[in-house]
Image: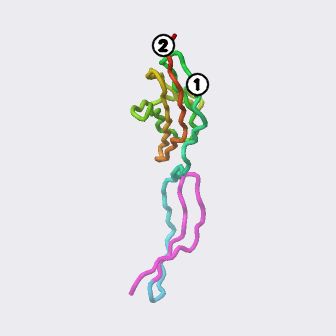
């Protein structure tokens, strides 16, 4: 003899999270036992993973030009629903973390070397997606030659 379980009907869904249903068990001799059960469970919102790469809209600062001072604010706009970190890579040798400044902007001050400099922005979200497409090159000239 074996048992099989079948659900005959769902009678109602309640606001308190309970689900009322009829449960029947039938054996091979067609003996049936029916019971009215209440199953309580919680509903959780399932957040799906963010499949999109953070969208780096632009690097506001520095710009591709000549600066007469070495200390510059690095400022970038990153758009994503779950930004985790925004990092500026300086001349492919040093990384600094940019702090959130509101309205999708991230920034930090940095003192650059004399001459040609490059900044690449890396933006990571909490789902592990990364964008590193934005690069700017600029020049620092603090000494004047005659």
**Residue on which disc 1 sits:** 65
Q: Residue 117 appears at what percent x and percent y?
A: 48, 28
Does the residue at mark 2 contact the one at mark 1 (Cβ under 8 Å)? no
Decide which of tag 2 and tag 1 comes sooner along the chain.
Answer: 1
Q: Is residue 57 above or below residue 109?
A: below
Find out whether residue 16 is within the magenta segment: yes
Which residue occupies 49% across, 32% down? Answer: 119
Q: Which mark, by number, is residue 143?
A: 2
Which marked residue is nearer to the observer: mark 2 or mark 1? 2
Name the secondary structure under disc 2.
Answer: loop
Span shown in magenta: 1-26
* Closer to us: 123 or 48: 123
User: Residue drawn at (42%, 81%), measured in percent from left and top?
Assistant: 3
Does the magenta portion include 92? no
Q: Residues within 10 Å of mark 2 (few under 14, many from 20)?
A: few
Residue 146: tell me if it is visible. yes
Question: What percent of the width, then of the height, locates residue 53?
Answer: 54, 46
Q: Secondary structure at mark 1?
A: loop
Residue 113, located in which quarter of the rendered image? top left
Give the CA distance from mark 2 to mark 1. Answer: 16 Å
- For the N terminus, the quadrant is bottom left
Q: Is residue 37 above or below residue 124?
A: below
């Amino acid at each position: 003899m074996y048992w099989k379980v079948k659900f005959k009907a769902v009678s109602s869904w309640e606001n308190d999270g309970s689900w009322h249903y009829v449960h029947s068990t039938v054996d091979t001799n067609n003996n049936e036992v029916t019971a009215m059960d209440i199953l309580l469970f919680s509903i959780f919102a399932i957040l799906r993973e963010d499949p999109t790469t953070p969208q780096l809209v632009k690097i506001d600062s520095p710009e591709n030009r000549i600066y007469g001072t070495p200390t510059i604010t690095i400022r970038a706009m990153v758009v994503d629903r779950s930004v985790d970190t925004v990092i500026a890579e300086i001349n492919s040798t040093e990384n600094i973390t940019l702090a959130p400044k509101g309205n999708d902007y991230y920034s930090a001050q940095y003192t650059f070397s004399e001459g040609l400099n490059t900044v690449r922005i890396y933006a990571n979200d909490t789902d592990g997606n990364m964008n590193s497409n934005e690069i700017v090159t600029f020049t620092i000239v603090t000494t004047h030659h005659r």
